């Protein structure tokens, strides 16, 4: 809710991108909040919601991403049920789901390849470093000043700065120092939110 309001207030336009849809709870909530925001007077935000998930778990887990609680079967869900619920919650808003493992759907691709221009909000909830790395590389051309990125599992892997979503983001920032980020708040059990405040 905070990030949707912040981006609306700043008139940061673009897509809402979510990597790791799982049961669709956060994806659906983002669409709901966007509707509420429009009623507050932030008209014509023209936000398309795009979700990325296999709905079949992680697939291959690399050695560097091994974790006692991140097992393939844990994140396998009833795809038909999830998609039906998302369709119901959309209520006419622009929405699409890109189904499949990231190795097949976004590896060696960038946002423009899927007709995604600018990103308004990006939710990265894919737990593993490799998945988060692929998501970040994919969104790189769509990041603008004001894009907000949420990392839902930022502090796990015992706080390692080299593993998980934290590790992927650290590597990304080193690789692309021209994109400057600032941490803006925490949420949940170990989640952090950053805003791209300058692109040199």
Image (cartoon, helix red, strand yellow):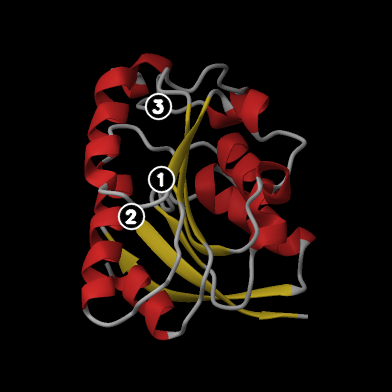
State the residue in front, 106 or 75: 106
Relative to 174, say whether 100 is above or below: above
Q: Position of residue 45 (x, y in %)?
A: 43, 71
Verify CB contact (< 8 Å) between mark 1 and mark 2: yes
Q: Which mark is residue 190?
A: 2
| Distance in Å between CA atoms under marks 1 and 3 | 11 Å
Query: Taking the image as drawn, is residue 88 in sight?
Result: yes
Which residue shows up at 23% across the image and 33% down it?
Answer: 85
Q: State which tag comes first along the sequence, 1 or 3.
A: 3
Q: Which mark is residue 156?
A: 1
Q: CA distance from mark 1 to mark 2?
A: 7 Å
According to the image, label 3 marks what residue? 70
The vertical placement of 40 against 68, above or below, is below
Residue count near mark 3 (Cα–Cα under 10 Å), binned few <14, some 14–19, many ≥20? some
Q: Residue at x 78, y 80 (%)?
A: 200
Q: Secondary structure at mark 2?
A: loop
């Amino acid at each position: 809710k905070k990030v949707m309001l912040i981006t609306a207030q700043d008139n940061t336009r673009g897509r809402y991108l979510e990597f790791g849809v799982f049961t669709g709870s956060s994806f659906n909530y983002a669409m709901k909040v966007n509707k509420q925001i429009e009623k507050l007077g932030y008209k014509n935000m023209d936000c398309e919601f795009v979700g990325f998930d296999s709905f079949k778990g992680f697939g291959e887990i690399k050695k560097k991403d091994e974790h006692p609680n991140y097992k393939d079967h844990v994140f396998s869900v009833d795809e038909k049920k999830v998609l039906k619920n998302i369709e119901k919650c959309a209520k006419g808003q622009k929405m699409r789901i890109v189904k499949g493992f990231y190795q097949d759907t976004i590896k060696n691709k960038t946002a423009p390849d899927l007709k995604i221009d600018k990103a308004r909000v990006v939710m990265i909830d894919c737990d593993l470093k490799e998945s988060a790395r692929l998501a970040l590389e994919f969104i790189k051309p769509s990041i603008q000043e004001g894009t907000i990125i949420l990392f839902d599992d930022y502090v796990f892997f015992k706080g390692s700065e080299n593993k998980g979503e934290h590790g992927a983001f650290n590597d990304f920032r080193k690789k692309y120092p021209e994109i400057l980020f600032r941490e803006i708040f925490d949420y949940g059990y170990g989640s952090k939110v950053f805003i791209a405040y300058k692109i040199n």
